[in-house]
Image (cartoon, coloured by chain):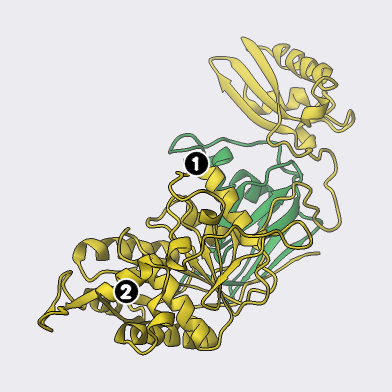
Amino acid sequence: MAAREEVMAALKRVPGPDGRTPLPDSGAISGLTIRDGKVFLAILIDPAEARKMEPMRERAEAAIKALPGVAGAVVTLTAESARPVAVGPPAHGPPQRQDGRRSAAPIPGVKRIIAVASGKGGVGKSTVACNVAVALGRLGLKVGVLDADVYGPSMPKLFGLTARPQLAPDGQKLIPLESFGVRVMSIGFLIDEGAPVIWRGPMVMSALNQLLREVEWGELDALIVDMPPGTGDTQLTMAQSVPLSGAVIVSTPQDLALIDARRGIAMFNKVQVPIIGVVENMSYFLCPHCGGRTDIFSHAGARKEAESLGVPFLGEVPLDVAIRENSDNGRPVAATLPESADAGAFIEIARRVAETLKAGAPGAKPAPRIRII
Amino acid sequence: MIAMAWPTDITVTDKGRILEVVYEDGDVIRLTAERLRVESPSAEVQGHGPGQKKLLVGKENVAIIGVDPIGNYAIKIAFDDGHDTGIYSWDYLRKLAN
């Protein structure tokens, strides 16, 4: 039975895609399998030249078949990607990206990007994101909010925005809407309320990249990204396509939510996004009738969790009907009830976030220098 | 919290044949383009489960033509044979060197 070495030696006599370099040296062989005396060979080519490469394929097949002990040979031409495949001597000089794909470049004008995330849904992550953004604005920062929850956008409702974003004068980018001093962009501005977004992952990835980069954010001190629950496509896309300065994790104090919050933190650790801290939402309930306090979802669970994981605790937000009512009416309490205890809680959280941003999140490190020389 | 290997400098030298990574702790690793190519973490090479890994041959002359940052944790390497879907985390690069 023929060995790999013998097959490769036989192919030395067959010129590769450039018509000169022997196939084994051309870098074009992308696969070689030998099974029951049959040889399967894949040659990588530029799909545009498939027809021209047919004689090469036939010669390679003949060369293998001529080997003793070979029961059969199947040589296929493959194209790994739509991008033209460089063959022969390696290209020199600076790298050229012709596919227009975006790398993890920062967004021009945006100083920091912060993800607000939770493992579990329904813990009030969007409400916290909205109010912390407004509170950061009240502290004097220029703030934007990107609604990354493509399947269930909440920002239009929370900020009371219904208009459609206009195109910037350059005709390329969308101008974010503005509410309570915060620039907001959401897929919800572009579709009708009630219309479902039924997309597979790759569509979500491309929509997110557009919402990030094809929006005229202008100068921002912080862009808050409201993540959907979970640890899936959106989280990975965000972690890969921009350098995130840090993540704020929202959880209720109950164990059921904390388990997922822990997953969220573990995910950010894996992709080396520093944790700015944990917010405990729905921390306790003060009865408006009797003034008595009830810890509906237990209490201080998120604080304890943060302590045990060694990440900062940012603050507690009570379960309060004023937050719910105002949020449903597009009037974030951090702006509309500025003197309330609820607003105070958000301001306090925002202050801690702002301090962290100034000093850099714990464990945050500068990106490595990448050079091609 | 984040205590994984952290690089300070990533340099492609020798006409795209060598990737050199300097880590914060002073460790310096050098990987050939060929090794990076055949050990690409991409599903195109590793498959979608154990036993699906593809054995690549004839990549001795492959060269790196591009390095893009991926978030805070990895780089994507583009090779001159058209392969550019491998995402190499800081830890994976160090693992390849050992």
Residue at x 62%, y 72% (from the top left corner): A367
Viewer-proximal residue among B32 and A343 = A343
Q: Name the residue tied to disc 2.
A: A323
Q: CA distance from mark 1 to mark 2?
A: 32 Å
Q: Amino acid at mark 2?
A: Ile
To which chain does the residue with label 2 belong? A
Secondary structure beneath dot 1 equals loop
Compared to residue B93, the image places residue A56 above or below, namely above
Q: Please identify the quarter of the rendering in which residue B43 is found.
A: top right
Q: Nearer the viewer, residue B65 or A358?
A: A358
Please give the count of numbered marks on the rendered protein.
Answer: 2
Q: Residues within 10 Å of mark 1 (few under 14, many from 20)?
A: few
Mark 2 secondary-structure assignment: helix
User: In the drawing, does residue A78 fall left or right of residue A287?
Assistant: right
How far from the left and from the top, in percent, is residue A197?
Answer: 48, 44
Q: Amino acid at mark 1?
A: Trp
Q: Residue at x 66, y 16 (%)?
A: A74
Residue A142 in which image quadrant: bottom right
Tag 1 residue: A199
Whether residue A187 is visible here, answered yes or no, is: yes
The colour with which the image depicts chain B is green
Apparent side of residue A123 relative to residue A105 in the rendered image (left or right): left
Can you give x and y, in whole percent of width and height, for residue A316 in the image? 29, 80
Q: Residue at x 63, y 37 (%)?
A: B56
Is the N terminus of chain A in the top left, top right, bottom left or bottom right quadrant? top right
Chain A, hue in figure: yellow
Chain hosting mark 1: A
Residue sitting nearer the eye, B13 or A48: A48
